[in-house]
């Protein structure tokens, strides 16, 4: 049941439903064991006794590990909200600090994520939510850039600096192989750019010999996160190319004149094949990354296959389905 729930969670099962199903496993195993002992006749058969013994011991070990982790989690995963920076009208970057040092986040990789809970006071810790780490690794702080799309993310804006958080991680394998991939092609939709912000900041900080092309779909120019930072990088760095694709704002001559010195390329409509053909003329040795809403990802995969003959299996995807 737990495996099936995990697989379903990758595609359609919401996290709020997946979490209790996953937690039920800790209850189902001992109940089934007791039921078999009380009413089952096959418990007298040696293979069955051995099988249940192995399962019972495994359950005790896993449950004990879970209890020990919860016991030390508050100490090892306790961070504090340091600051809130407004990026756009509905998106903020939250920076966290841990007085004892970064702990488990001392060696996290760009593209990874963490699970965040905040202290609600009387009601204890909030429900967990996963967010990609958007800063560059290597510092004593971590940060995530979050769009306000639900009650949890809207509440974050109202939290005061100093609010305790549980930050568990780092998790995820949506990470480049910087020593092998000479060209990183990053395709993002909206706030799905956050792992790519971490990647770009890491490349800039470490001066890595990697070329990065970011093709990023947003509704309008006002929805673009880290606009000034990316503009400065594109104007001063030959390794970074940024193509903005706006779905609800016209890219007119007047618009292009206004942004002519910002170092970006501009397109309108959807992130589609004609844009790939225009800006991705050399994909030899390139690694494709894709992060954004699921419908957008499906469309992009079809367009990459149709225009550049890139099969979906060659594209690394981050599926943020929570």
Image (cartoon, rainbow, N blue to C red):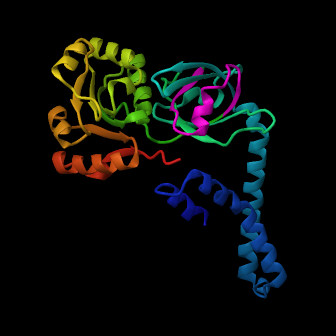
Q: Is residue 148 magenta?
A: yes
- Can residue 96 be seen at all in this image of the molecule? yes
Is 201 included in the stretch rendered in magenta? no
Can residue 139 be seen here?
no
Residue drawn at the location 18% of the way across and 45% of the way down: 308
- For this rendering, which residue is in front, 51 or 116? 116
**Quadrant where the N terminus is found in the figure:** bottom right
Which residue is farthest bottom?
Answer: 41
In percent of width and height, residue 86 lies at 51, 20
Compared across the picture, whether 64 is left or right of 319 comes to: right
Is 129 in front, or is 213?
129
When the figure is inspected, residue 239 is found, relative to residue 129, above or below; the finding is above
Q: Quadrant of residue 204?
A: top left
Q: In this view, does 266 lie to the left or right of 20?
A: left
Residue drawn 24% across the image and 14% down it: 258
Judging depth in this view, the residue of 105 and 132 nearest the camera is: 132
Q: What stretch is highlighted in magenta?
A: 141-166
When asked about the image quadrant of residue 242, the answer is: top left
Give residue 7's position: percent from left, percent from top.
51, 60
């Amino acid at each position: 049941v737990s495996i099936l729930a995990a697989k379903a969670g990758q595609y359609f099962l919401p996290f709020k439903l997946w979490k209790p199903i996953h937690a039920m496993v800790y209850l189902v195993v001992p109940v089934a064991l007791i039921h078999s002992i009380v009413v089952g006749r096959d418990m007298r058969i040696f293979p069955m006794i051995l099988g249940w013994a192995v399962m019972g011991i495994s359950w005790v070990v896993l449950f004990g590990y879970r209890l020990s982790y919860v016991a030390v989690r508050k100490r090892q995963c306790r961070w504090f909200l340091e600051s809130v920076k407004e990026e756009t009208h509905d998106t903020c970057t939250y920076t966290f600090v841990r007085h004892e040092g970064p702990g488990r986040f001392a060696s996290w990789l760009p593209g990874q994520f963490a699970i965040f809970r905040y202290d609600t006071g009387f009601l204890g810790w909030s429900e967990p939510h996963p967010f990609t780490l958007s800063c560059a690794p290597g510092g004593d702080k971590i940060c995530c850039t979050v769009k306000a799309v639900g009650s949890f993310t809207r509440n974050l804006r109202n939290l005061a600096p100093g609010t305790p958080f549980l930050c568990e991680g780092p998790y995820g394998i949506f990470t480049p192989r910087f020593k092998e991939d000479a060209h990183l092609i990053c395709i993002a939709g909206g706030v799905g750019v956050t792992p790519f912000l971490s990647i770009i900041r890491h490349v800039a900080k470490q001066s890595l010999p990697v070329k990065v092309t970011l093709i990023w779909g947003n509704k309008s120019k006002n929805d673009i996160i880290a606009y000034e930072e990316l503009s400065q990088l594109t104007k001063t760095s030959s390794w970074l190319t940024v193509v903005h694709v706006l779905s609800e704002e016209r890219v007119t001559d007047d618009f292009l004149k206004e942004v002519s010195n910002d170092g970006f390329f501009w397109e309108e409509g959807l992130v589609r094949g004609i844009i790939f053909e225009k800006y991705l003329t050399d994909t030899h040795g390139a690694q494709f990354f894709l992060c954004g809403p699921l419908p957008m990802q499906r469309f992009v995969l079809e367009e990459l296959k149709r225009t550049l003959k890139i099969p979906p299996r060659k594209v690394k995807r981050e599926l943020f389905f929570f």
